[in-house]
Amino acid sequence: MSGRDLRTFLSSHRSGTFHTSKTSSDSLGRKYTVGSAPKVQPVDYEQVLSNIQRHKDNVSTGLKRFKSISKKGKETKETSILRKHHEIWKKEHTRMIDLQSKVRSELNQWRADILAKDDPIFNELLMELTTFESELYEQSQQFRALTLTPVRSVRTELKSLFEERSEVDQLTPSPLELIMAELETVVEQQNKIQQLLQDEYEIVETDLEVFMDDWGICNHGNTLVVKETEKVVRGVPLKVKYLECPDEKLRSEVLNEFSRLDEQFTSLLDEWRSTNESIINLPYGGWSRCNAERFCYLVEQYPPSLTNRRRLYMDRAVREFPYKRREEIVAHESWHHSLQHYLATQRTLLTSWTTHRGELADKVTSLFEEVRQSCQVNSLIMREREEWRQKCQRQYHKVRTWREEKVKVQQAEAAKIAKQRALEEEQHHRDELRQQKKRECEKHEIRQYHSNLESRRHADLEQVRRLEDVVKIEKKKQATLNVGRIEYRHERLSEKIAEAKEAREVAEKEAIEKERRLELLRQQVQVETTSDPERVLQATASTQARLTALTEPDLRQPLYQLHSYTSDKITSDPRVRVETALREAGLHTSHYARKILSKIPPPQRPRPDQASTLFKDTK
């Protein structure tokens, strides 16, 4: 019971049961009459209890409505999330179909190119591929016959059987046993096929792992990464190694730059690999290969530009991995993001390494070309040898300056990468702290809400108990007061009866005395004529003259001109007669009477502007 309901209950209860003022006493006194028994208005506690019950029912109805609204909101939210999943999966399905069509078109184009070359080796390879494709098609048809055909036949037989019999209980035991036996056979066959497919899947996976190890391909949770460090050719490139340079010192110094560049990027890669060694050495983030690949495919389906991307793919992951706790999924997500960051940084370093080597090779080629041209000129003009030496020194100085600039640039890039990594770690730490504070606030609000509910419930119980105690005390006081009132009213009634008796005796004596005096007066004024009682019933002379002057039509007109309904018109309405009958039966205030009266048409159709709206709510 809320505060408003409690105030309404107290005001109505006091106004209806606990009046002890003078007005209440006067109204109670007016109920007594001479010769009647004393009456005391009782307290209607049943009405009070019904009011309490009605308020409780209103509260329970509100709670049910709140629960239904909350349930509807959850269902709407769930439907919205599922609709978004469906849209994303539809896009992914379209992309996969397009990719499949592209691969098939490329394969057909490759076959057409092979046929156009008319090479015996390629023709033999194409023949083997065609044979292998036909074998795969036959195996797929055989697999379909062994798996789908029995299931479809059993389904068709069961459907026809249940269509013939309207109820399952009418089936005899023998057909049911045959059906169950056939179903068990199909299930056993399907289990064998599934086991065979699982064994073949494991064999293919093993062959793929051997193939990837042979070709230097690493698989980090469905992310295929070729060992680019082995693809980057270290040392002096071949196009630079055999270039001619007259100055051997300059040649050795310039070629050593490739070794320094390789050592620098190798140290950066080793440092980056040692920093993320815990991520690399944890295969598939502690999950199985199948689950890790499924999680990676799932995350890739949701583009980074999508709103609430993490919420959607985490909801999808929870649905697809019901046997994994949310903490495990979050941990695997963190490992996946760390691995992606590690691989992206590694690719950036390798690309930068390759770019720097190309720039250095181009620079060295141009430098050696300049030196060679200078040497040719100096061989022709010996007098300019000193100038040639100075030019070599200048070129050497340029190379050293360029090397220093490159070192500075590389240091700046390394510092930038380190700063970016620190910022990302700081941002991740802030996000974790924000999420932790948010969860703590939500937990605190939930605990506060439960404590408020508990305190409110205890307060309501205590208030009801106090009200019950107050009602009991007031009932005891009222009972004591009623006893005194009854005694007082008895005394007052006895006094009034005695006074009334004395008044009647005095009135009788006065009436006798008045009658005696009137009799004396009548004797004094008595008329001395004969008695003619019929003269009283006869008309007077003036009345007789007026009636003689009236005609027959004048006698039929009413005494006064009426401008309203007559009694005959009112009683001719069937609704009046039905209402009178219902009133005599005591049913004129019931719902049945209202329903009957609303269906009885009037004698004349009412005007549209005077249509009654009394019974609109009862229809």
Image: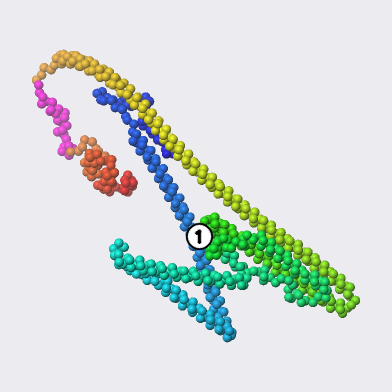
Q: Residue at x 58, y 61 (%)?
A: 285
The quadrant where residue 528 appears: top left
The relative height of residue 527 versus residue 187 in the rendered view (above or below) is above
Q: Residue at x 58, y 51 (%)?
A: 435
Q: Nearer the viewer, residue 318 or 616?
A: 318
Magenta-colored span: 531-555
The quadrant where residue 394 appears: bottom right
The relative height of residue 23 versus residue 6 in the rendered view (above or below) is above
Q: In which quarter of the image is the N terminus?
A: top left
Residue 567: x and y in percent read: 22, 39
Left or right of 537? Residue 189 is right
Q: Can residue 379 be seen in this view?
A: yes
> Residue 461 colored magenta?
no
Left or right of 548? Residue 270 is right
Q: Can residue 307 be seen in this view?
A: no
Q: Nearer the viewer, residue 11 or 30?
A: 11
Residue 548: x and y in percent read: 14, 33
Q: Which residue is drawn at 34% across and 26% down?
A: 479
Considering the whole magenta stretch, tell me its main secondary structure: helix
Disc 1 on helix, strand or loop? loop
Residue neighbourhood size for the residue with mark 1, other residues' Cα within 10 Å, grouped as few (<14), some (14–19), many (≥20): some
Q: Residue at x 38, y 31 (%)?
A: 471
The quadrant where residue 51 appears: top left
The relative height of residue 395 versus residue 307 in the rendered view (above or below) is below
Residue 325: x and y in percent read: 52, 56
Amino acid under label 1?
Phe
Residue 183: x and y in percent read: 37, 67
Q: Which of 427 and 261 is in front in this view?
A: 261
Residue carrying label 1: 321
